Image (cartoon, grey):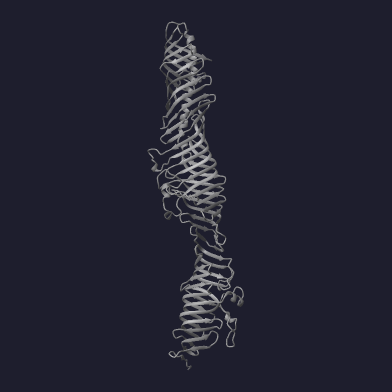
């Protein structure tokens, strides 16, 4: 986030040149050499000289090397007051180690022996030049190459030989290969070797558009440092300022470190060539203190440490901000920022773009979300010195997601939010390619181990999911595209136990746009006392609706026994299998499709699709002519009689009933079949348009059968084109009533008839015949007599 530091790195090198070469070099050398000259000149020419000497040179040597030379066109000494004047003066300073070739030029100098002041009348020109090869070259030789010459110009400079102090109230201008600038008023304290720049310090960097200003400056030799009050750097790309900046210098006058204190702030803004609407955003950075460490002769920046309320903020279409107690910036190459190490409660916040926040929820699912990452430590990795590439956390980390609101909508006191935690997060950033160039946005986040997501809405229980790892993908305009959790995934919606939905799987994929949670890898979901497994399970976290695909298996446990029920009345679990499943959260109804089968104990229903309501114990099954609904029932044991061919045990043979549709409510104990209904027992087959099967109460049926037998059929009522087939006879009518207690059929409606292979065809208003014997009871009316057609054997 402190990208402005990168963009302003040239400030550091330029400031080093200004403070070390210009100011320090000028005044330290000028003070030292000028004092020696003014002390030596009166002794060389003598205070009692009355004539003027034209054209002379004075040199001072030590150890076989010349320290300085003074050349002047003429010197005048006034005997009355002892003052001396020097005209057209040229001074060359070599230094004791011959490492300098500094030159001072001036037209007029005046020396007052009473005050000890030497004053330059008018302009003074100074050239400061380093001469590293001076010690190995001939004495007083000019350097082969004049590099990085620093030129200074001032006027009315006063130097006192007794105190060593020098000053001027005039403006001092300087010019270097790297910068130009000026200041107003300079004071040098000889005893403390302290140089004070009184006011209006200005520096213009030659190679950039940057300008440096300061209210006041102090430079000392011990310690070797320069202090600027209210330094301010301005360039087209931004501003850097602080209450105070201290530059620590090496012995070679290169900058070793810079300490900025008090309201350290920086800002970068789009240039005129790249306006804000072209994708650039203004970035603001603030800290209580900043320390910059530099290396090498070129003062290359290596680290920058920001401490105390560190805050960086990107404003514009998609706001982003970061906070920390401390941030360490690491640089490589030529001041290229590579890494930011944020500690002491690091935080990164990204707001959804202003344009996306206004999108209606109906159009964008859950809508854009604001993102907040918090951890004890966050490392930000940058590419090319200014592009945020990724961020890594250390310590227990947390992500908070909250729905974004347009500025016109007041923020609720307790908005919905999602909290994501993990042992470590790795965030990746990308540049938007479809939109304006230059905008960086959060792309993906991975978290591991012990990933946990808690989603909460005011007034509702928190929904919690856990996994070994997670990956979240984000939209360029802000908000989550998807969250994928892998390894030992679990989920709970926090409802009371009787309504709670829980899930387990190897993997889970969540998309906020449709709030769909997709489970794979042996998923298992429980809702209350219902448990389901499948190949894939999908849960809509907004509506609670769930779907399952592939090898679906559901078990409804904790069933209470219903003595007045029948087919699904016991306390045993109810099981259902199918290819797919859809569960409605509001009604609790479950629709199983694809070779569905529902059973409890020995009671079973099989159909292409089965809809089941656990609370009402209601079943609606749908079939086709090629794949009808199938149920199997056991008749209530028939009463034994001397005329029956079979005993009670034979009457217990099951009856299979099929049809295109079945509805069954356990409290009514009635199974209603429609369309293409066929009931098939061991010795008969009955077909009709509709059929109602009435079952015995569970309490009564349990007395007549052992555990695990199907429900007991008391009677069947079939209507519409009824046809009954037995091995030796066929009966037709419009309505059939079959009672299992006496094992008889009553056929009525539409001139029912029965055809017996031995006795022929019988037609009447009502036909009653028995399943196990040959008895037929025929009833007729006055207008509809009984007709018997008897076959004659030949």
Residue visible at 45% across and 52% down?
A: 367
Q: Is residue 151 visible in the rendered structure shown here?
A: yes
Q: Give the residue at the far bottom of this rendering.
A: 794
Q: Residue at x 57, y 46 (%)?
A: 396
Q: Which residue occupies the foreground of this view, 119 or 681? A: 119
Q: Residue furthest left?
A: 273
**Does 202 sit left or right of 600 as displayed?**
left
400 over 57 or under it: above or below? below
Count the marks.
0
- Image coords of residue 186 (percent x, y): 46, 22
Residue nearer the viewer, 667 or 409: 409
Question: Horizontal and vertical percent for residue 407?
Answer: 43, 47
Which residue appears at 56% of the width and 67% of the height?
575
> Residue 121 lies in what quarter of the image?
top left
Give the answer, above or below, for where 76 lies relative to 465. above
Residue 487 image offset from top left, x and y in percent: 56, 54
């Amino acid at each position: 986030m402190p990208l402005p530091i990168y963009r302003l790195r040239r400030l550091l090198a330029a400031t080093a040149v200004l403070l070390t070469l210009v100011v320090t070099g000028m005044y330290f050398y000028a003070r030292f050499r000028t004092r020696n000259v003014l002390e030596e000149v009166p002794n060389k020419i003598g205070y009692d000289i009355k004539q003027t000497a034209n054209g002379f040179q004075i040199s001072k040597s030590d150890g076989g090397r010349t320290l300085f030379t003074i050349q002047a066109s003429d010197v005048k000494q006034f005997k009355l007051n002892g003052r001396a004047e020097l005209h057209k003066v040229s001074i060359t300073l070599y230094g004791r180690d011959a490492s300098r070739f500094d030159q001072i030029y001036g037209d007029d100098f005046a020396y007052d022996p009473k005050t000890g002041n030497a004053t330059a009348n008018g302009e003074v020109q100074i050239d400061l030049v380093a001469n590293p090869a001076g010690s190995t070259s001939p004495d007083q030789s000019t350097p082969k190459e004049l590099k990085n010459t620093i030129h200074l110009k001032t006027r009315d400079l006063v130097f006192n030989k007794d105190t060593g102090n020098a000053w001027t109230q005039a403006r001092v201008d300087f010019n270097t290969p790297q910068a130009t600038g000026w200041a107003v008023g300079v004071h040098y304290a000889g005893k403390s070797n302290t140089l004070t720049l009184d006011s209006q310090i200005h520096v213009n960097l030659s190679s950039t558009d940057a300008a440096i200003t300061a209210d006041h400056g102090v430079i000392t030799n011990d310690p070797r440092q320069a202090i600027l009050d209210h330094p301010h750097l301005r360039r087209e790309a931004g501003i850097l300022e602080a209450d105070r900046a201290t530059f620590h210098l090496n012995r070679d006058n290169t900058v070793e470190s810079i300490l900025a204190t008090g309201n350290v702030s920086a800002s970068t803004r789009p240039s005129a060539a790249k306006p804000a609407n072209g994708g650039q955003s203004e970035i603001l950075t603030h800290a209580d203190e900043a320390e910059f460490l530099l290396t090498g002769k070129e003062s290359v920046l290596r680290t920058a440490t920001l401490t105390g309320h560190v805050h960086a903020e990107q404003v514009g279409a998609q706001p982003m901000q970061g906070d920390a107690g401390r941030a360490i910036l690491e640089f490589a190459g030529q001041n290229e920022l590579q890494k930011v190490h944020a500690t002491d409660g690091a935080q990164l916040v990204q707001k959804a773009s202003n344009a996306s926040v206004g999108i209606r929820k109906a159009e964008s699912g859950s809508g854009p979300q604001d993102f907040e990452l918090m951890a004890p430590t966050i490392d930000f990795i940058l590419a090319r010195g200014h592009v945020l590439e990724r961020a890594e956390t250390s310590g227990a980390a947390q992500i908070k997601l909250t729905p974004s609101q347009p500025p016109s909508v007041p923020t609720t006191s307790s908005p919905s939010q999602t909290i994501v935690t993990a042992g470590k997060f790795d965030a990746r950033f990308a540049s938007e390619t479809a939109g304006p160039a230059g905008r960086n946005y959060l792309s993906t986040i991975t978290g591991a181990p012990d990933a946990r997501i808690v989603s909460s809405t005011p007034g509702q229980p928190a929904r919690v999911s856990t996994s070994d790892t997670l990956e979240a993908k984000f939209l360029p305009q802000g908000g989550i595209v998807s969250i994928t959790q892998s390894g030992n995934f679990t989920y709970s919606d926090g409802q009371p136990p009787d309504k709670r939905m829980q899930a387990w799987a190897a993997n889970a994929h969540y998309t906020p746009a449709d709030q769909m949670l997709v489970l794979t890898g042996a998923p298992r979901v429980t809702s209350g006392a219902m448990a389901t497994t499948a190949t894939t399970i999908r849960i809509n976290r907004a509506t609670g609706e769930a779907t399952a695909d592939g090898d679906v298996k559901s078990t409804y446990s904790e069933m209470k026994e219903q003595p007045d029920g029948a087919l699904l009345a016991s306390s045993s679990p109810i099981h259902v299998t199918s290819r797919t499943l859809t569960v409605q959260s509001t009604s609790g109804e479950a629709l199983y499709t694809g070779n569905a089968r529902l059973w409890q104990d020995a009671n079973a229903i099989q159909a292409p699709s089965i809809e089941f309501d656990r609370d009402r114990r209601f079943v609606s099954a749908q079939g086709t002519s090629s794949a009808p609904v199938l149920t199997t029932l056991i008749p209530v044991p028939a009463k034994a009689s001397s005329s029956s061919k079979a005993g009670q045990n034979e009457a217990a043979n099951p009856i299979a009933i099929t049809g295109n549709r079945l509805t069954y409510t356990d409290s009514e104990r009635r199974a209603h079949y429609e369309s293409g209904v066929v009931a098939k027992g061991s010795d008969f087959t009955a077909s009709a348009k509709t059929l109602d099967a009435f079952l015995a109460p569970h309490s009564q049926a349990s007395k007549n059968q052992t555990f695990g037998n199907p429900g007991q059929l008391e009677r069947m009522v079939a209507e519409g084109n009824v046809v009954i087939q037995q091995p030796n006879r066929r009966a037709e009518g419009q309505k059939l009533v079959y009672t299992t207690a006496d094992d008889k059929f009553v056929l009525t409606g539409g001139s029912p008839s029965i055809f017996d292979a031995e006795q022929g065809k019988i037609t009447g208003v009502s036909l009653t015949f028995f399943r196990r014997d040959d008895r037929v009871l025929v009833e007729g009316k006055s207008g509809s007599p009984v007709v018997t057609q008897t076959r004659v054997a030949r």
